[in-house]
Amino acid sequence: MTDRSDSERDAEWEMVVGLEVHCELATATKLFCGCRNAFGDEPNVNICPVCLGLPGALPVLNEQAVELAMRIGAALHCEIRPSVFARKNYFYPDQAKDYQISQYDLPLNADGWLELPDGTRIGVTRAHMEEDTGKLSHVGASGRINAAEHALVDYNRSGVPLVEIVSEPDMRSAAQARAYASELRGILVATGASDGRMEEGSMRVDANVSVRPAGSDRFGTRCEVKNLNSLRSLGRAIEFEAARQIGVIEGGGTVEQQTRHWDESAGRTEPLRSKEEANDYRYFPEPDLVPLAPDPAWQERVHAGLGPMPADRRAALSEALGGSPSTAETDQIRAVVDLGLDGLIAAAVDAGAPVALALARAANEVAAGGEAALDLDPAAFSELLALEAGGRLSATQSKAVLGALLERGGGDPAALAAEMGFEALGADTLGAVLDQVIGENADAWARFVDGDDKVQGFFTGQVMKATSGKANGREVAAELHRRRQAASAT
Amino acid sequence: MSDADPGRAPLGRDDVVHVAHLARLELSDEEVELFTAQLRTVLDHAADVAALDLSHLEPSSHPIALQNVMRADEPRPSLERDEVLGAAPAVEDHRFRVPRIGGEAP
């Protein structure tokens, strides 16, 4: 390592990143057998002769998996081509049959692209179909792979349909790689192909990272980094790996082509083993399956059936806001579309809620609800915003009711507000309280009437105190101003 | 994907040792000699086929001219777990127990 600053070093080196994203398809069954495709079941309950590779078992392709794979290809502007399944041979207990059925030289989808929110286009080399492997748990003193004493295998996941999306080495920063993964996740969810949950392994990202002197057009030796379980890990691992490679080269060494494992807690990558030559997998066409060549009519149906993609949805929200959203609103728009909350906003706006209010509540309070956010009933959200926009609930009260809706997984906003003691005070009650507060603070009231606006907060506070916070701040302010005008006029 | 390319060097002893390693086969020196000769005969035959002018024929990876054989995405019963695990050499916690592994999956 050298004592130069990071920025000097950044100016001398350029990182080159390509991503391989494995996406589990949201089918009911596995790719080649009728075992259930389910996450979180008891170990080894969804296994059969096909996914265990028992002698004589014959795989039969799942039509819905092909449909979803084509949707992904179409959404990524790929050409959908006649394809052939191949056996990828290797000995590792994550596959009981010692080969994985994948696609090799003839993938279903090829030559596409994905556009990042900032307009950069990243090439998509291919998006092919393959089966997932079983889940290994390494058992040993430290829990680390390299130190494990033995491993336990659950084949529930073995044979689950996957699409592997391979990008071109078009990314030049960790931020760009994150943006790609994030946008891709949004697209996968929008096609209905996946739930996009990285933490459950529905979407898994491997990064191919290399570095080269700035201005060079030749690629350096790349390392493949695995075990990236979140967008944050992806960004950190790429930063670490690029810096490591620069350190190796600046120290006079050469980067070795390797598969490396990201250790999240240690914040570094570690070598797993030297990467075997691709032909060591001895790919050959899977003799138990016939070629897959979706006919043009099916392809057309897939294209026609694609709903709006994240970019379209961001554009729609931006337009609803008048076409030139602020920076904060642009961030909010990205967040709600990433989280799939724009449908909520659309429902609320259709029901008459102001767009900016719906966007703010969705991007902040609803988004903070995590998983519960996706289950929020659009009708309840719309009704709550109507209460807030109509002045029957203050912003603070509305947020509290929203929190309760998310926590309880639903409910009637008006009833919840009442239960929380948020029912709006009747005009008579507010009038009576104001009469009393003004009467008790005659001097302050005189100053307010004379135009001293600083006292307004004092009166609002007194009213809130007298009503235990049930008064609506906006209504109190309106009433205070109405009375001041009346007082000044006399 | 055979080694039938006529321009390619003939199959050697090292190739057989390498392929045997990939297949996790432990071969004696005599066996390596034996299989090198035998495999070379097989590949020579493939080279005879490769020498033919087949430019008028479509490549085929399957003997039957079928494509798009698919099934509906409908669950079917899986095997009884206890029965499957009962046939395994080692089991722990309802999972197959396997020896320690040097690296991650390829």
Image: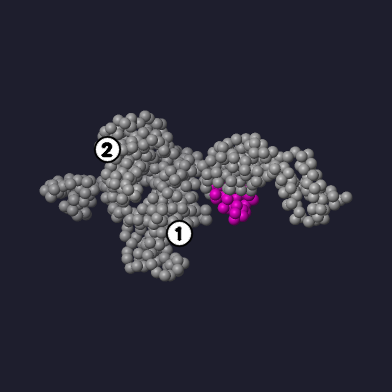
Residue A173 image label: 1
Residue A58 seen anywhere in this rendered image of the structure: no
Residue drawn at (31%, 31%), measured in percent from left and top?
Answer: B82
Pick the front one: A329 or A381: A381
- Circle count: 2
Mark on residue B90?
A: 2
* Residue drawn at 74 percent across, 48 percent down: A462
Q: Amino acid at mark 1?
A: Ser
Q: Position of residue A159 (x, y in %)?
A: 35, 39
- Chain letter behind tag 2: B
Snapshot quadrant of residue B63: top left
In the image as oriented, which residue stretches furthest toward the right?
Answer: A490
How far is mark 1 from mark 2, CA to CA?
Answer: 46 Å
Q: Quadrant of the N terminus of chain A?
A: bottom left
Q: Position of residue A137 (x, y in %)?
A: 34, 44
Q: As drawn, which residue projects farthest toward the front?
A: A440
Local crowd at mark 1 within 10 Å, few (<14), some, or many (≥20)? some
Secondary structure found at label 1: loop
Q: Is residue A249 above or below residue A34?
A: below
Q: Is residue A243 magenta?
A: no
Q: Secondary structure at mark 2?
A: loop
Q: Which mark is residue A218?
A: none
Judge left or right: residue B56 versus residue B39: right
Relative to A323, is A105 on the left or the right? left
The residue depicted at 78 percent of the width and 46 percent of the height is A437
Start and end of the magenta stretch? A312-337
At 23% from the left and 46% from the top, the residue drawn is B23
